[in-house]
Amino acid sequence: MYPQPASGFVRRVPNNPSLFCLAVSLVLVLSVHLGAQDKTFSPVKRAQIEKTVSAFMTANSVPGVSVAVVQNGLPAWSAGFGTSDLEDSAPATSATLYRLGSISKSITAVAVLQLYERGNLDLDAPVQKYCPAFPQKDSPITSRQLLAHLSGIRHYNQDGKGDVPDDSARHFATMEESLQLFASDPLLSRPGTQFHYSTYGYTLLGCVLEGASSQKYTDFVRENVFRPANMDHTQVDDFFAIVPHRTRWYHKDRSGAVHNAGVLDSSYKIPGGGLISSADDMANFEIAMLADKLVKRSTRDLMWTVAQPTDGKPSHYALGWFIADKLGIHTAGHSGGQQGTDTDFVLAPDRNVGVVVLANMDSVNTGALSESILKIILDLPARN
């Protein structure tokens, strides 16, 4: 059984014991959009999406999921499923705030490209022009290379040495302080030659943004991305603050039991994985991107052009966005994952549609769910 739209605002459906070993019923909360809305969204497709989300949650024991759909460049539908807090049975809604994880990189990329568009940042200048706190390396590193993960800066160490522990409330007050985690490490490869995914590279990019804009990262992004895109509740994931509507974070162990996820103060990686947002806010971000509201079309085209390394395997990463062509559909988007969260958003710009999926459990592959929802919207065949 899957959740059906209610005649009222909230509909509770019978508990599915295979979803959790907890007495929590599945909840669907339909959002109400006060602004422009695409009223042509099919009830049949909505029911298909609800069924798909319910199956995903059951298969992965996910406590809460929020979904938003953009169609014809307008908000078409959004909903929350399940619970945002298992301890008090608070329902997940389309306004629930989730850790975005690496989706933060796409937002940071937009902010950096805004500075480029305004002539305040040279994408091909050495990063020290804007972030003198980062030491010189054997070869210069540019902002363009940081955006495309071609800088040679490492990602997290697999053994955890030199990194923030998985369960840590250590707080980093500035971008410069965060640089200390990796700034002295050697590069993995000469800049431009190989793709090495690096969240730390985006921490350096945050320092570059601050130098080029003469503003704190959070202030610049709030004024130039969140406000113009009507992302009214998107913000830094402040571990110590009281944040209304922020979900709790969950993890499933090898036995299948659901637990609270580990502690995470993400202040060391805000530009690459330290923001929180809702499905509704992220849908507004998609709408703003489709309407060229945040950057010019030519700048968007640059941002969505894959930057290929000069050596090694081909990349599918542009400047802060993953680019794909599946079943004849060109898409741009990003996924994210860290303690207590798994997220994905995807745009099909040629079709003027988008999907957002946010979950409050880690390692559950929301990318597969967002792809399934996109196929429903576009009437594409399911995978064999």
Image (tube, helix red, strand yellow):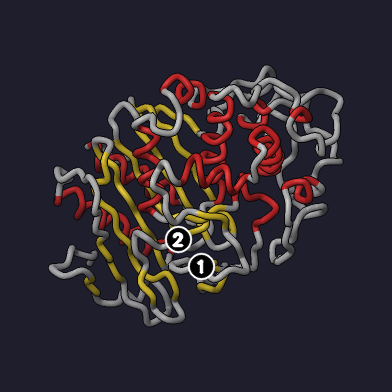
Q: Is 156 situated left or right of 248 in this image?
A: right
Give the number of marks: 2
Instruction: Tell me the kind of residue under disc 2.
Output: Leu
Residue at image coords 24%, 58%: 32
Q: Are marks 1 and 2 in contact (CB under 8 Å)?
A: yes
Look at 44% across and 74% down and name the residue there: 85
Front in this rendered view, residue 377 or 129: 129
Left or right? Give the position of 280 relative to 238: left
Q: CA distance from mark 1 to mark 2?
A: 9 Å
Q: Which image quarter: residue 240? A: bottom right
**Circle 1 is placed at which residue position?**
243
Residue furthest top as drawn: 310
Q: Quadrant of residue 6?
A: bottom left
Helix, strand, or loop for circle 2?
loop
Q: Position of residue 250 (x, y in %)?
A: 52, 68
| Crowding near the residue tagged with mark 2, few <14, some 14–19, many ≥20 C-alpha atoms within 10 Å | many
Residue type, mark 1 in image = Val
**Residue 210 can be seen in this image:** yes
The residue singled out by tag 2 in the image is 97
